[in-house]
Amino acid sequence: MSSMSDEPLVLGIETSCDETGIGIVRGHTLLANTIASSVEEHARFGGVVPEVASRAHLEAMTPTVERALEQAGLRFSDIDAIAVTAGPGLAGALLVGVAAAKAYALGLGVPLYGVNHLAAHVAVDQLEHGALPKPCIAMLVSGGHSSLLLVPDVAKGVVSLGSTVDDAAGEAFDKVARVLGLPFPGGPYIDRAARDGSGAAIAFPRGKYDDGTLDFSFSGLKTAVARWVEARERSGEPIHVPDVAASFQEAVVDVLTRKALQACREHDVRDLLIGGGVAANSRLRALAQERCDAAGVRLRVPRPGLCTDNGAMVAALGSDLVAAGVTPSSLEIPADSSLPITTVHV
């Protein structure tokens, strides 16, 4: 494509969990990124309620799309393609986004691209740091996923190297926050509390640390924190929340960064990308940078606003698929709550 204006305008729709995200990109240039979050409606339940999320997506879809067009200074008629998260995620929530995307694509007479939510977390970094190195290692850490991927070319496919065998990292943050009496979602609150504590205060276990695989396990760590807190409460000893938060956080990021660099070594790749909601964690970013510098690996992490779920990441992957000449999706595509990571496009 000869100039920026020749690149297609792609509108991305993300509804896999509790954020209605709409993004508009031209190539790797971000023009709009609007989000309506229902997180406060779920907070009193201590976790995301699928039915509540689906209803919130229905209500937020049209106004959030209109806000994105306004932010970008565009009309519907300017859009060249629609991209939507087809999976993985909450079935009902995904259905809202997929149905809306089909309606927009049909109404506008433009191609539709159903994309994988996890691959979109990889593609989004290009909006900030330019084209991805080929290949790179991507570590995706969020409420539902902890995955290590080899990414030869994000539009053509990814290779799964390892994933969580139980709780995802973000899930462990939420559960430990609950034990410590911190609000939902737990990640930002633990990150904040940990700043006043010591990561070396309590020796919490590191699951699968030296097992030679690239898989993760955080369930034992979560249980260890809960037992430690319960034991203190029983004996009437004070619990210094910042120390517990910092020590738990340190155990998680130690394992994550260790395995990520192990993947880089094993596959002789010099570029590491970290994405997903937990990539917004300040300690993960700092330790990853420190260890990458020591190992001669270049680190790419999107700014925190692009790490959490958003429509820009879906539009970015859609834009890659258009540029790669990938055949658009059929208007019959299903919403697949368990879409495998290796299926980038449906």
Image (cartoon, rainbow, N blue to C red):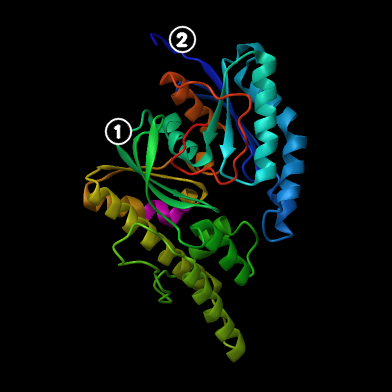
Residue mark closest to the camera, 2 vs 1 = 1
Magenta residues, start to end: 281-286
Residue reaching furthest bottom?
235
What SS does tag 2 mark? helix
Q: Which mark is residue 262?
A: none
Q: Residues within 10 Å of mark 2 (few under 14, many from 20)?
A: few
Q: Quadrant of the N terminus?
A: top left
Instruction: Where is residue 345? Give x, y as percent.
Output: 49, 32
Disc 1 residue type (three-letter): Lys
* Viewer-side residue, 291 vs 260: 260
What SS does tag 1 mark? loop
Which residue is at 75% across, 48% downward? 52
Q: Which residue is mark 1?
A: 134
Disc 2 residue type (three-letter): Asp
> Against 26, is 334 above or below?
below
Instruction: Where is residue 279? Give x, y as percent.
Output: 46, 49
Q: Which residue is mark 2?
A: 6
Q: Is residue 219 left or right of residue 43?
A: left
Which residue is at 46% across, 35% downward? 344
Instruction: Where is residue 101? Give x, y as percent.
Output: 65, 27
> Against 326, is 129 above or below?
below
Cα–Cα span, label 2 and label 1: 24 Å
Residue 67 sits inside the magenta stretch = no
Residue 285 sits inside the magenta stretch = yes
Q: Is tag 2's residue or tag 1's residue first in the polypeptide sequence?
A: 2
Q: Is residue 289 left or right of residue 234?
A: left
Q: Is residue 48 left or right of residue 113?
A: right
Name the quadrant containing residue 185: bottom right
